[in-house]
Structures are given as structure tokens and as C-alpha cells.
Image (cartoon, rainbow, N blue to C red):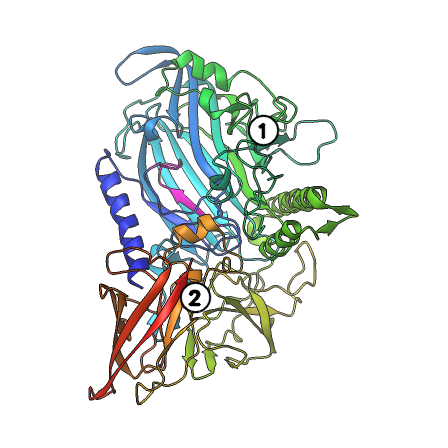
Amino acid sequence: MVVRLKNFVLLLILIIVATSSKSFSQATKSHEIGKLWETMFSSGSIPSYAPLQNQMTYPGGDYRTMTRKNLEGLGLWIGTANWTDKLNVFHSNYVSEGGFENNEAFEFVYPISIRKRVRNRLPNVTVNKILEERFLDTRSSSSRSSSIPADEVIESKWATNVGVNVNMFSYALANQNHNSYIIREYIFTNDGNADDDPNTIELPDQNLTDVYFGFQYLLIPGGDRGHQIVNQNDDWAVYYGNQDGDTLRGLYYVYDGNADADHADWDDIGDPEPTTGEFLSPQYPGFGILHADTSPTDNNDDRNQPATVNIVPRRIMKSYTKGNTENELYLEMSSGVQSNGTVGDAPTPYDPLVQTPVLLMSFGPYNLNFGESVRIVLYEAVGSISQKLAITAGNEWLNGTLEFNGKTGDEAKNALLATGLDSLLRHAKNVEYAWNLGLENLPTPPPAPDNFKISPGPGKIDLEWESVAEEEDWLTKVNDFAGYKLYRAEGSYTNTYQLIATFNGDTTNYTDRDVQRGKKYYYAVTAFDDGTQNTTGINPGQSLESSQYYNRNFAVAASPFIGASKTLDSVYVVPNPYHVQGLAYGGSVIEDYTDVPRLEDKIGFVGLPAKAIIRIFTMHGDLLATVHHPNPDNPNSVPESADEEWFQITDYWQTIKSGVYVYYVEGWDLEGKPVGSAKGKFVIIR
């Protein structure tokens, strides 16, 4: 619709304007096939000028505002000792500082290339004969490959001013046991290239000594939603690893704490939405370690790495921009600190000593001779209670009826939210299993069905898709196809999806008649196998299913309707009176105000002819809005239906207030013959 299109155009303008002022712009590619969504940048760090992006978005969903982000900052430092730069200046210690606090570090890093390869192209999805488009993860943004070790691989390359080339591979999987993490494999090569031209060698034959590779992470659980309510970051940070009895290689994670009384007069662990109680920050986002080379000549995993695990508040985090010296940055990387986190360092997570924790995790020291490489492999993962549970349990907590494990009230809420850590640790276990097995040896689900067509009709929605029954298992080349599953969400594609039908065998169409006129519906169809080829998985024999995120409709909803009226005798407004009765199921104040127009502001004009113009006036006769039916600016406006939606936004881009309003409708039939006019009143109560 026009508001949504303007919102998206505005974001594009922001990107273009911001990047045009830089010496170079970063290209991006996105993973959106599993529960965890992420955007990769061509220099590895997250630029502050890219408003349209995924940042460990979990569970993935909103392609515009990207709510449920969990990552705000990511950067990379490369430090070395006794180094001479290309201007022949000697540095006793030096850090090529590509951290997110150093104005994107354009004088230190030089993007070279980024590309994305996939096993299966994203399916085409059409709704109301309109082809869906993903703005970040499009079909044209990737190429199909039969040789990659995962369902998706994004490869980015960049050079640094110390002559170390960084080649990063990120891996995403559609397997339901492995779709809540993304692996990042870094290969650091001393090739002497110190600018954006890979064909030149500015630092030939250099040998680097005492090299450290430092990764910076600023994680904020549900940072785009929950923290805005209290206007305060109140997160605890934990590093779980390098301790006696640890089985994990090393895992850093963050979880939401409790704001002070100046910001919230209730226990806000999990950031409950004040109106609905929905837990807006139930996530446990984390970064873990899979591998670190012992040396450039010994590729065995060095379990003594990382050398430094330091967690500091963002306000005292070091960078050249803040005036810190080369020695200070290098000593930060090589300090040998092994922090276990911020818990216990302060009485509250909003204490200045620990607020907004940033992790610096460094690996080294390595002696990296010219032409040598070091490999370090990390992963991103997020654990959480389900979105549905965050909604229903949040509502119960707000109403005082929540019970969990014998607890009630805030204790029940906090104990329930803490189970998100269990799921994070499960994902960590699964990613270690997959990496040790070899990603290419994991069993694979069938591909998602292509050409998914969603066609609303009178009191029904017809669905059809292409068969994948003849597709062989990717790994074993044996046909193990078993059937399809159909899922549906109501109101918004970010709401929870329910399984509405299972088809054993090659059924490729379905008519959904359990629908209501005027409601918006979103669908996904998956394919599943019989499990016979799943011999190397975590659960051998388990039936595997393609991801629900492959072929969901996003931008265009499917809404059943009744046929256009032949007269204007039965035009009316629903609901009338309109009264704000709360938020849409699964919504929140913050999310809905960024998601313009808001679902809860919708009213409908019904009983319309095939073509109409609706004019809305104040009681004083001032024209507020002119709405065409069908509406060319609204992809959800169905031709030949009797309905048209309006979100109470005037032609001057304002939301109308409480009051009595007048509508005047002129109508025509399909051939353009006038069928008369009608007028009436409706009431808005806010």
C-alpha cells in the first residue's frame, strides 16, 4: 500500500544518501532460510548507515524494519608487533582497527568482493497474481551451486592496511535441527595487499610477528523492540568456556535483565510489552567458537584459544576514534584476560560498570610469514522460547495467571524465559556436531516447492505449488520424498504459523475454506521426506522438512472476499464505531509504530461496486482522504471485490483522531457505467 511503499523508499534513500558520502560502499548478502536471519557485509563489520538489514534477527520475519534483531555491533581488529607500514614507518605495536566504533574504519579495511551461492534458488511466490519480492534476499542475489557444503554460502573478501587478506565464508542450513545458527569461517592470509586492488602488493615479503585477531560483538536481545519501551539497555553477559568441566569450545551470550524503577515499575526481565504482556526480549543471542588453528603450519584446533576474553561497557570500549593509541589497542587484545561475564560485577545490569556489554575475543599470538594463513571458525546462534509462548505466557503474566514449574508471577516469568538458555546450548551442541561431522555430510531435507500460488476467492483461498516428488536426496541421491505440509498465519507474517494440512504423497493443491472475509492470511508450504536417508543426523531416521521461510508470502496478504455489489444500497463501515481495543495478536507498541500502517488501525468499507471512489470528510466538510477502489497503491486491494481497507491515514500523512466522520462514495460497474452514490457516518474512538 502507499504508506508501506513510501516507508521502503525512504529506507532506500537513507541507504543511498549515506553510502554516497563514504569513500566506498559495502555490498551485502543475506541469509533468510532458517529461523536465524543475518546480513553479511563485504568488509565483515556492520556499518551504522545501513538501516535495512538483518542482524541476528530471530525468529526471522520482518523484511523491512527487521524487528527482533539481536546484534548491534560487529567488528574485527588485527594486531601485530614490530611492524613497518607501506610508508616505511615503524610501529612497535599496531592494530588495523576495523571495529564498529571507528567510523567503519575506511582507512583500515578495503572491501573486495561478496557473493552468495545456494543449493536451491528461492521459490517464486505469487499472491493475487502479484509476484512476491524479498528486498534483502532475492533470487537474483545468489547463484546455484552443486558443490557447496551447506544450503547457503556467502563469501566475502576484504583487504586490510597491514597486508592481511580476510576471506570469510558464512554457512546457513535449512535442516530443522540446524537452522538456528550461522557459521562464520575466517581465513586470514598474509598476502601483502593493503588496498582495494587485489592485483597489487603494497607490502611484499613481509613477515608478521605476534599477530592477534580480535572479534568485537555488541549483542542486545530483541534490541529493536523491548529496550525501546524502557529506553535502557539492561543486559547481562556471560562467557561459558575455558573452565573446568566445560564441554563447549567456548560460548559468549547475553540475556535481558531488569531495568531500574525510573524506567519500569514492574519486573521487566524479558521486556514485557505493557499493554499485552508479550515478552519482547526473550532471546539468548550468542557467539561461539568452533576452531582456531594452532599455527599457520599446524591446522589442529588449539583448545587454549581464545587468548583474551574481555567484556567492557561500550562507553569505555577502545578505538582510534576515541583517541586510544596503537599500544593501548594492542595491549587490549593481548592482555590475556579471561572474563566469565558481567554477572556479579555489579548489582544491576544497568550499572555503568557493566551496561551495554561489548565482547572483545582475540586469538593469538601467531607468527604469520608472507603467504601463510590462519583459520578461525565461529558461529552465531540464538536460543529462545517460542514466539507463541512469548505471547500467551506474557498475557498470562500480565493477568496474574502464569504458572511455571511450581512458580507464579515474576518468578514463573523469569524461570520460563531462562529456558531460552537451554535452547541456545542445544543449538551450540548441534553446531559442534555438524562442524565435526563436516557440513557436507549432514542429511538434507527436500527442496521447498517452487511457484507457490495463493489466490483469494469468495469465502476461500486456493493454493497450488509445483511438485518436488521426483527430487532426489541431495546427499545420497536416493528419492525419499514423502509429502507436504501447509502452514498459515493470520494478521501478519510475523505472527505464529499453524500447521493446517499434511499431505502424504504428491498432492500439489489445497483450498482453504476456514477463512474469514477481510482477514489477512499468510502461508508456507514445505516438503518432507521419509527419514530413510537420515543416517548421519543428530536423530537418525527422523523425517526432515524443508524450511518454512523459503516460500512464505511477505509483502502481499491473501484475503477472502465477496463479489462486488451491483448497487450502492448496502455500503457501510466496519467496525463502526471503531475503538482501539488493544494491539494485534503478537504485536507491540514499538513494532507496530515502525510497521506503518498499523494493523489495528484498519477499518473497512464494504458493499462497494466493482469500481469506486471514497471521500472522507470531517463534520465541518474538510476533505481528509480520497481512497480509490481498487486501490493501485495497495497490493492487498482485490479487484472486483466488495471491500476496501483504510488505515485512518489522511492524504496529508496524519492519523485521524477521535470524532465523527462523513464518507461519500461514487461507484461504477466493471464497464464504467455509473451505479450511483452513497454517504454515511462513522465514529472513531481512541
- Categorize mark 2 by other alpha carbons within 10 Å: few (<14), some (14-19), many (20+): some
Q: How far across and how far down the image is residue 642, in percent?
A: 36, 81
The residue that mark 1 highlights is 349
- In terms of image quadrants, where is residue 204? top left
Is 126 situated left or right of 523 in this image? left
- In three-dimensional space, the C-alpha distance between marks 1 and 2, rounded to whole angstroms, equals 42 Å
Point out which mark residue 200 bears.
none
Q: Please tell me whether residue 40 belongs to the stretch shown in magenta.
A: yes
The residues colored magenta run 37-48
Residue 375 visible in the snapshot: yes
Residue drawn 74% across the image and 31% down it: 245
- In terms of image quadrants, where is residue 636? bottom left
Residue drawn 53% across the image and 37% down it: 377
Please state which amino acid type lies under the numbered disc 1.
Answer: Pro
Q: Label 2 near label 1: C-beta < 8 Å?
A: no
Please state which amino acid type lies under the numbered disc 2.
Answer: Tyr
- Categorize mark 1 by other alpha carbons within 10 Å: few (<14), some (14-19), many (20+): many
The residue that mark 2 highlights is 578
